[in-house]
Image (cartoon, helix red, strand yellow):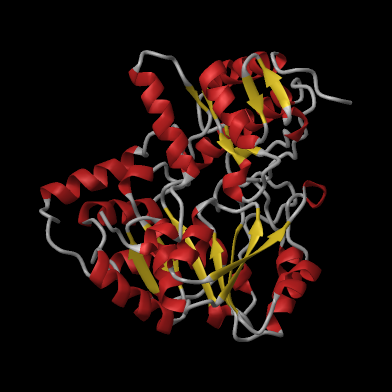
Amino acid sequence: MKLSSNLLRFNEPETLKMAKLSRELRAKGIDVVDLSVGEPDFNTPEHIKEAAKKAIDENWSHYTPVPGYLDLREAICQKLHRDNNLSYTPQQIVVSTGAKQSIANVMLSILNDDDEIIIPTPYWVSYSEIARFGRGKVVFIHTIPEKSFKLTPEQLEAAITDKTKLFIFSSPCNPTGAVYSKNELEELAKVFQKYPEIFIISDEIYEYINYANNGEGHQSIAQFNYLKDRIIIVNGLSKGFAMTGWRLGYIAAPVEIAKACEKIQGQFTSGTNSITQRAAIAALDGPLTATCEMVKEFKKRRQRVMELVKEIPCVKCVEPDGAFYIFPEVKSYFGKKAGDAVINNANDLCMYLLNAAHVSTVSGDAFGEPSCIRISFANNMKNIEEGFKRIKKGLELISLCAN
């Protein structure tokens, strides 16, 4: 069977692969602790669910406008003004079936063959694969834990060429939890100011899950007006409102890009689910009480996870300022054995932990940093403690690492 060569341009997301392998083990009766999942373990807040039920009763069951209902796009504009002090019009908003589709729409709107897209590593797994699907050429910039996995202005400027068309990053970051301050974003913005042909995608899906103690709150690079006409904000409801399965993301962008995304989406999926959109209005217009409570719990888990990871020998870990992951360096275990298992890299280590310790994690290789693994604390405290207990025991069976 001869399939499209497009399939060779990108890979299956490692996060979904690990979830699938975990399900297969559970189907065999094996108890697997899932520390790979990238979704809150909380339920959607009641007032949002009630809005969805009301929408069903009121027969919001027909096709929706491709960019989203007008009153939802107005609610997004109000949210951006309230939370981020940013001014947008509904014509600049496109609602999609998840933030992943939003990113795909934007990349397919902007990239031509071999245009360069700069991605600082570590990065969310789908950035590079969507870019490749859009026939862009990915240019990675390696960041380091000593700099809290944040890109420096010098690194950014060194990576820019006359073929650079797009830059994408997230703050708070998946997988590292890095959060850029206003000053750090401004330094990057000054570099971009010199290169007016470069578009910037700012992935802000973890906006509300922010633990940074600088008193600033979430900062968006779109606040710098001299860049705003080429910045595309990507956001959604999955993380901050525990609405992963509802599938709703959105962009705030220059009108030309919004229109281009609407055109592309019109041929792929058309408008997003009607009931989800009505629920989204309630989420954006309503109180953030449930979100704040969720973040408080994540903060407690982060503290406990940092205590637990420090108990594991030869593992280094930067404390995350946002999101709900840690991204420890585990390369001291590479080149070692546990029984018949040989641990050559992070992929091997994650498979060993899954099969021997029955804990699912994700290889850092999927995020562009092969010396690390991603461990999620979007699970309850009991499972987190059990998962780390198993990880510690499993790693004790590996030959002692060198000092």
In the depicted structure, whether residue 245 falls above or below residue 379: below
For the C terminus, which image quadrant?
top right
1 up-or-down from 381: above or below: below
Residue 105 in percent (x, y) is at 39, 69
Q: Residue at x 70, y 36 (%)?
A: 328
- The one nearer the camera, 394 or 102, is 394
Of 167 and 234, the residue lying toward us: 167
Is 350 situated above or below 147? above
**Relative image position of residue 145 (x, y in whole percent):** 77, 47
Q: Position of residue 166 (x, y in %)?
A: 57, 74
Residue 48 in which image quadrant = top left
Residue 312 visible to an observer of this rendering: yes
Left or right: residue 25 compared with residue 398: left
Q: Toward the viewer: 35 or 56? A: 35
For this rendering, which residue is in front, 326 or 229?
326
Can you name the residue that lies furthest to the front here? 1
